[in-house]
Image (cartoon, rainbow, N blue to C red):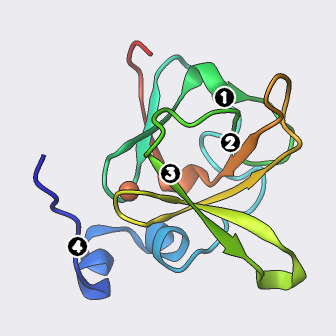
């Protein structure tokens, strides 16, 4: 597939809404319990709101209670990249879309068995489609 991702921040601003730009490009965080996919249990797939790459599916989504959509697994091995994040006085692992480098959220090791992974993802970084998974 041809890569049609914007190549400048000006183009990203044109492509994304203000809220999407704030989270995806400026690494903002939507307020907890505010996102449209926090409480959302339809069957389907979650795509990057920046570039439409497939990132997660409903099979790995769980209710963590943290206030953001939570997943135990990414969908493809190369869908997501990890960045060490030392902002806000914490050491965390940021997750970004491997395709467009858009900020998605963070990953923690307090998820459910068997792998204990919790991807904590901003709803605004995702677009859901009801599909078979
Ligand atoms: Fe993306």
**Ligand 1 within 8 A of label 4's CB?**
no
Work out whether residue 25 or residue 112 is closer to the camera in this orientation and state it: 112
**How far apart, in angstroms, are the residues tagged by discs 3 and 2?**
16 Å
Q: CA distance from mark 1 to mark 4?
A: 29 Å
Q: Nearer the viewer, residue 108 or 40?
A: 108
Lower position in the chain sequence, tag 4 or tag 3: 4
From mark 1 to mark 2, how far is it between C-alphas?
A: 7 Å
Q: Secondary structure at mark 1?
A: strand
Q: Are marks 1 and 2 in contact (CB under 8 Å)?
A: yes
Which residue is depicted at the point 85% across and 24% down? 113
Q: Is residue 96 above or below residue 40?
A: below
Q: CA distance from mark 4 to mark 3?
A: 18 Å
Rendered residue at 26%/84% (across/down): 8
Q: Which residue is mark 2?
A: 69
Relative side of 127 to 65, left or right: left
Label 1 neighbour load within 10 Å: few <14, some 14-19, many 20+: many
Q: Is residue 41 visible?
A: no
Q: Which mark is residue 6?
A: 4
- Which residue in the structure is indicated by mark 3? 80
Residue 50 x, y percent position in the rendering: 36, 59
């Amino acid at each position: 597939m041809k890569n049609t991702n914007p190549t400048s921040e000006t183009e990203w601003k044109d492509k994304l809404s203000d809220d999407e730009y704030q989270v995806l490009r400026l690494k903002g965080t939507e307020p907890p319990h505010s996102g449209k996919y926090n409480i959302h249990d339809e069957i389907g797939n979650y795509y990057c709101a920046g570039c439409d790459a497939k990132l997660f599916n409903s099979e790995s989504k769980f209710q963590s209670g943290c206030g953001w959509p939570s997943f135990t697994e990414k969908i493809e091995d190369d869908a997501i990249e990890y960045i060490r994040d030392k902002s806000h006085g914490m050491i965390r692992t940021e997750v970004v879309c491997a395709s467009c480098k858009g900020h998605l959220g963070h990953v923690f090791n307090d998820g459910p068995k068997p792998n204990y992974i919790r991807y904590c993802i901003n709803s605004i970084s995702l677009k859901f489609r009801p599909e078979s998974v």
